[in-house]
Image (tube, rainbow, N blue to C red):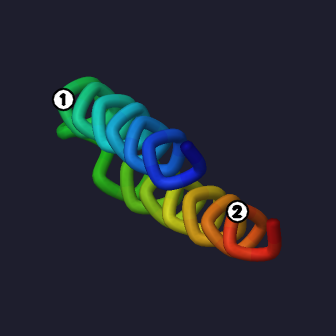
Amino acid sequence: MIKQQQKSQIYVGKNIENIIKQRCQSNSMMANLLNLFFIIVLSTSQKEWQNY
């Protein structure tokens, strides 16, 4: 159950990441900041799932 939720969370994260990359190709600085943000969010949410 938790693993399934984790997978869908990562999938959603990757989808959002792709959309942002497409939108922000001209502004790579902004894209890099958003990528960092998503990496942090995904890694912290994974840690939270592991604690359960």
Mark 1 lies on residue: 22
Toward which corner of the image does residue 20 lie, by quadrant? top left
Residue 7: assigned label: none
The three-letter amino acid code for the residue at tag 2 is: Trp
The three-letter amino acid code for the residue at tag 1 is: Gln
Measured as percent of width and height from the top left, residue 16 is found at 38, 31
Residue found at the far front of this picture = 1
Image-based side of 26 in relation to 39, left or right:
left
| x 18%, y 29%: residue | 22
- Mark 2–mark 1 Cα distance, whole angstroms, equals 30 Å
Image-based side of 13 in relation to 24, left or right:
right
Check disc 2 and report its element: helix, strand or loop.
helix
Mark 2 lies on residue: 49
| x 50%, y 65%: residue | 39
Measured as percent of width and height from the top left, residue 51 is found at 80, 75
Image-based side of 50 in relation to 19, left or right:
right
Measured as percent of width and height from the top left, residue 12 is found at 40, 32
Toward which corner of the image does residue 46 lie, by quadrant? bottom right
Q: In the image shown, does 16 or 49 lie closer to the viewer?
A: 49
- How many C-alpha atoms fall within 10 Å of the one at disc 1: few (<14), some, or many (≥20)? few
Instruction: Judge whether 30 appears above or below 19 on screen.
Output: below
Image-based side of 8 in relation to 50, left or right:
left
Foreground disc of the pair 2, 1: 2
